[in-house]
Image (cartoon, rainbow, N blue to C red):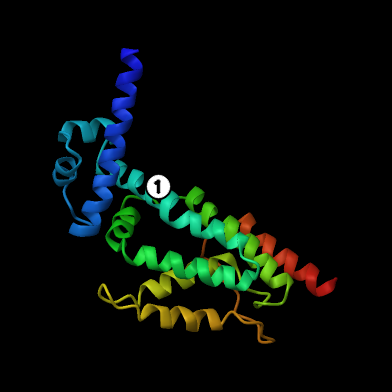
Amino acid sequence: MPEQRHRADALRNSDRIVRAAITALREGGAAVPLEEIARRAGVGIATVYRRFGDRDGVIRACFETYFAEEVEPHALAARTVADPRQGLAGALGAIVDTMASHRALLTAAREAGAFTEAISERFAAPLGDVLAEAQRRGLVRADLLVRDLAAMVVMTLATVGPPGLDGHRRYLALLLDGTRPSEEPLPPPSATGAAVSPAERRPRARARSARTG
């Protein structure tokens, strides 16, 4: 029983630290010190190091929690929308909105190496399924890749202004308009980019079968 109680206390401490860090990053920027995170969590700095090893460990845990709670659900929800094109548009809009309010966390996560292949696949897999269905119905261009959707998120985030202004929605709408079916092929993706994932290969394979079926 004492061991179980100790384990439960440790888990609660970890959760407090992660959530305190997410808030501290949002309010104080990417350089917020671990001491401030510990203070907000109501624990000593030694507890932070004991639970996460170092600052990068804290940031990676923050990003995993943030992604699981505020990004992944939007990608998964896109599968439930009757019109797959609208599903993609809604998911990308919601993902941009939440990322726009957590830019310091994203900066810190990039520096800490939190953008892993596993995280990318959790973003790509559900959106890849929706993209494949949209392509099968002829609602989006057949040569669109999942990585293009991720690039659209990044490009839109570059237009985000001060809090309270939502001009970035205009630019996301422009990018989404460019996904409509077209006879003009896109240039090939960069050969120096990441390898094509299974989630990317599925939409193209299905699109080819829809055109030849």
Q: Tell me if residue 208 comes above or below residue 107 in the rendering.
A: below
Amino acid type of disc 1?
Glu
Residue positioned 55% across, 83% down in the render: 177
Residue 171 at x, y = what percent? 43, 82
Picture residue at 63% right of the left edge, 64% below the top:
130
Q: Which of 75 and 184 is in front in this view?
A: 75
Residue 29 shows up from this direction = no
From what the image shows, is residue 98 above or below residue 35?
Answer: below
The residue sitting at 85% across, 71% down in the picture is 213
Quarter occupied by the N terminus? top left
Question: Which secondary structure lies at badge 1?
Answer: helix
Asked if one can make out residue 2 in the rendered structure from this viewpoint, the answer is yes
Q: In this view, does 48 lie to the left or right of 98?
A: left
What is the x, y in percent for residue 126? 59, 57
Which residue is the site of mark 1?
64
The quarter of the displayed image where residue 81 is located: bottom right
> Which residue ends up furthest to the top in the rendered image?
1
Q: In this view, does 90 lie above or below 73?
A: below
Percent of width and height locating residue 135? 69, 72
**Residue 189 sits in quarter:** bottom right
For label 1, count other residues whose C-alpha is less than 10 Å away and answer few (under 14), some (14-19) or many (20+): some
Picture quadrant of residue 28: bottom left
User: How many marks are shown on the rendered structure?
Assistant: 1
198 to the left or right of 117: right
Q: In this view, does 79 lie to the left or right of 29?
A: right
Q: Where is residue 111 in the image (x, y as percent from the top left)?
A: 31, 54
Q: Residue at left 22%, top 35%? A: 48
Nearer to us in this view, 188 or 33: 33
Q: Which of 95 and 33 is in front in this view?
A: 95
Toward the right, the furthest residue is: 213
